[in-house]
Amino acid sequence: MSDDLLSGREPVLVLEPGRAERHYWRDLWAYRELFAILAWRDIAIRYKQTVIGAAWAVVRPFLTMVVFTIVFGRLANLPSEGTAPYPLMVFAGMLPWFLFSTILGEASGSLVGNANLIGKIYFPRIIIPGAAAVVALVDFAINLAVLFGLMLWYGYFPSWHMLLLPGFVGLAVLASLGPAFVLSALNVKYRDFRYIIPFVVQFGLYVSPVGFSSAIVPAEWRFWYSLNPVVGVIDGFRWCILGGKSPLYLPGFLLSLAVVAAVLWLGIVQFRRTERSFADLL
């Protein structure tokens, strides 16, 4: 069926044991239009019939930045990184965190939300959580514009490191997709996982260096602190946005990269292992 889609001919359904398994990743490319349709639908649903529309993407990180600046910057008197204003350092950490947490939240419930589609037609199911992640990228683009506004407000201009930011955006997406694949598959079988996910996200916000610099972590613990893959992503964002004034802790960053790769691989394996049962469970 996928060969016909690629060549433009009218598709012919071929029922052959193991065919879908052998051509899974090729089918993923063949169904790219379905990915685009699902992503556009999720974006439209996200912003349709809302009072302030895209401003919802700004309110959460902005208010969180204000709270963290008061609690960590003023009350706890924690240092910023280099000469960067504390609110700017916090918002630079907010960008990857909200990208990560939004993908995790949107993708984890995406299979249950598309139960009717899964039960009717064949396509690689991994498309669904992948398409749900696109909504988070739209929110990220809006918040990135807010960041540039803050930098202008404080008169803080980026260095050439900013050119490498797209690579760290991709790293943040990969870091979130691994656990998202696992949670979306588990949510199909165990529906109470939808109550656990917000708790995990809230807990992760406070154990990740969002409201403070990871440089304050004691030297003997900083490497192991990077077992949290979000640590390397946040440090990378700050290195790009704040420039050389926020040096990248290379050993910890490499450890975070390894954890991201391992979790992504495990997420794909777990998703593929349980994928056949989705239609029956939904």
Image: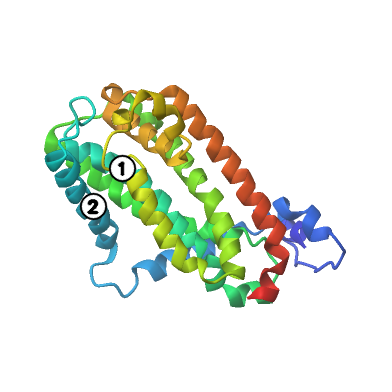
Element on which disc 2 rests:
helix
Q: What amino acid is labelled 2 in the image?
A: Thr
**Marker disc for residue 64:** 2
Residue linked to disc 1: 210
The picture quadrant where one finds residue 228 is top left
Residue 33 in sight: no
* Crowd class of label 2 (few under 14; some 14 to 19; many from 20; radius 10 Å): some
* Crowd class of label 1 (few under 14; some 14 to 19; many from 20; radius 10 Å): many
Horizontal placement of 108 versus 144: left or right?
right
Q: Is residue 63 above or below residue 170?
A: below
Name the residue located 69 percent from the left edge and 56 percent from the top edge: 272
Name the residue located 80 percent from the left edge and 68 percent from the top edge: 12
**Placement of the C terminus among the 4 image quadrants:** bottom right
- Report x, y in % for residue 235: 36, 33
Element on which disc 1 rests:
loop
- Report x, y in % for residue 155: 13, 32
Check contact, mark 2 vs mark 1: CB within 8 A: yes
Q: What amino acid is labelled 1 in the image?
A: Val
Name the residue located 58 percent from the left edge and 69 percent from the top edge: 190
Q: Is residue 241 above or below residue 245?
A: below
